[in-house]
């Protein structure tokens, strides 16, 4: 453990984002904030900092407990931060369920057929 580490590296080491390059892209797009401010990927993260990540349908808020300076086991990585994210609302949960059902219906490389379109209408609440 060290005194501080780059934000993009920390997000990767703590398993909050899959890869460092994906973390760097998310930071540059403004989807990651540290202590309420937009920062660069090279920003140094210290214990006690609060990181807010915009993910698909919600914001994830974590407080850095320990700074990781290398890849570690996932259990140890999860112990390096405290998750402060509130529970998702019912609307968010319903949207996630709908998205999962829609993805299961057909593969992205095919166009929905007549039966698939009928299923879509039923799922979305249409006639």
Image: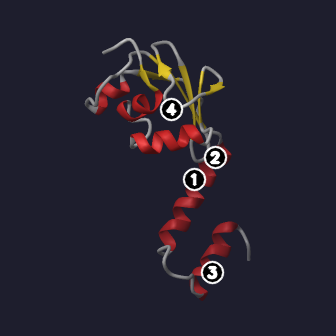
Question: Which residue occupies the extreme right position in the image?
Answer: 127
Q: Residue at x 47, y 20 (%)?
A: 45
Say which element carries label 4: loop
User: Residues under labels 2 and 3: Cα distance?
Assistant: 24 Å
Circle on res. 117: 3
Residue where numbered disc 2 is placed = 92
| Number of numbered labels in the structure image | 4
Could you say where residue 25 lies in the image, as x and y percent from the top left? 52, 44
Could you say where residue 61 lies in the image, as x and y percent from the top left? 56, 28
Q: Residues within 10 Å of mark 2 (few under 14, many from 20)?
A: some
Question: Which residue occupies the extreme bottom position in the image?
Answer: 114
Between disc 2 and disc 4, whose residue precedes? 4
In the rendered structure, the answer to whether residue 26 lies left or right of residue 19 reads right
Q: Residue at x 51, y 24 (%)?
A: 43
Say which element carries label 1: helix
Compared with residue 67, is residue 61 higher up or lower down, i.e. above or below?
A: below
Circle on res. 41: 4
Nearer the viewer's eye, disc 4 or disc 1? 4
Classify residue 14 by image quadrant: top left
Q: Residue at x 63, y 74 (%)?
A: 120
Between disc 1 and disc 3, whose residue precedes? 1
Circle on res. 27: none
Residue where numbered disc 1 is placed = 96
Between disc 2 and disc 3, whose residue precedes? 2
Could you say where residue 42 lies in the image, as x and y percent from the top left? 49, 28
Q: Quadrant of the C terminus?
A: bottom right
User: Residues under labels 2 and 4: Cα distance?
Assistant: 29 Å
| Rendered image coloring scheme | secondary structure
User: Residues under labels 4 and 3: Cα distance?
Assistant: 43 Å
- Is mark 2 in CB contact (under 8 Å) with mark 1? yes
Between disc 4 and disc 1, whose residue precedes? 4
- Is mark 4 in CB contact (under 8 Å) with mark 1? no
């Amino acid at each position: 453990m060290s005194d501080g580490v780059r934000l993009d590296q920390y997000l990767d080491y703590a398993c909050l984002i899959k890869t460092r390059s994906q973390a760097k892209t998310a930071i540059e797009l403004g989807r990651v904030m540290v202590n309420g401010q937009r920062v660069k990927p090279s920003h140094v993260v210290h214990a006690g900092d609060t990181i807010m990540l915009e993910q698909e349908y919600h914001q994830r808020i974590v407080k850095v407990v320990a700074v990781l300076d290398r890849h570690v086991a996932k259990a140890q990585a999860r112990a390096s931060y405290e998750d402060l994210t509130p529970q998702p609302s019912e609307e968010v949960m319903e949207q996630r369920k709908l998205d999962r059902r829609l993805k299961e219906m057909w593969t992205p490389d095919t166009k929905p057929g007549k039966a698939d379109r009928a299923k879509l209408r039923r799922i979305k609440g249409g006639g």
